[in-house]
Image (cartoon, grey):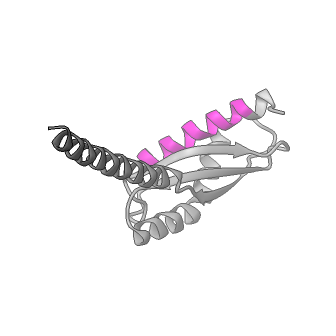
Amino acid sequence: MSYPRVKRLSEEIKKIVSDSIRNELRDPRISSMTSIVEVDVTRDLRYVNIYVSVLGNEKEKADTMEGLTKASGFIRREIGKKIKARYTPEVIFKLDESIEKGIYMYNVITKVNEENHLSEDDSNDTEDDSDE
């Protein structure tokens, strides 16, 4: 069951965190290709899981996650300044690789479709030759 207040709070936190990462954090470890995919606030509003996507190699991902983890106190303080709630939720960053997995799957499907298309063309060419 979805709770409207939790959903609204999640969206607001997503905006705040995205803005903070883009404009206020100066940590060189955090990649410029970092995006917030999803924000889940627990029902008791004590914790917020922030799913982050980082496009880059494994080192960039690890560095970005380390930088975000170190900046979680700052981000929590920014959330506390901008939302009116009894508790400011504790920020937990999690790496989300679903975008990269989607790109990989798209490439695999495209490759298979191209191979099927080429094999169909070859079989059509041989059928045309046998008809003559």
Q: Nearer the viewer, residue 3 or 115?
A: 115
Q: What stretch of residues is rendered in magenta?
A: 7-23
On screen, residue 45 versus residue 107, left or right, reads: right
Q: Nearer the viewer, residue 71 or 118?
A: 118
Q: Predominant secondary structure in magenta?
A: helix
> Can residue 79 be seen here?
yes
Residue at 63 percent across and 34 percent down: it is 11
**111 shown above or below 132:** below
In this rendering, position of residue 3 left or right of residue 25: right
Q: Is residue 81 left or right of residue 66?
A: right
Report the number of discs: 0
The reply to whether residue 82 is in sight is no
Q: Is residue 51 magenta?
A: no
Residue located 61% across and 59% down the image: 94
Depth order, front residue of 113/20: 113
* Quarter of the image that includes the N terminus: top right
Q: Pinpoint residue 16: horizontal percent, then vertical percent.
A: 56, 39
* Residue 91 pos. (x, y %): 67, 54
For image coordinates 21% across by 47% down, the residue present is: 126
Which of the 4 image quarters holds residue 100?
bottom left
Location of the C terminus by quadrant is top left
The answer to which quarter of the image holds residue 80 is: top right
* Position of 63 relative to 14 (above/below): below
The x and y percentages for residue 55 are 40, 56
Taking the view exactly as shown, the residue that stands out farthest to the top is 4
Residue in the image at 81% along x and 31% along y: 3
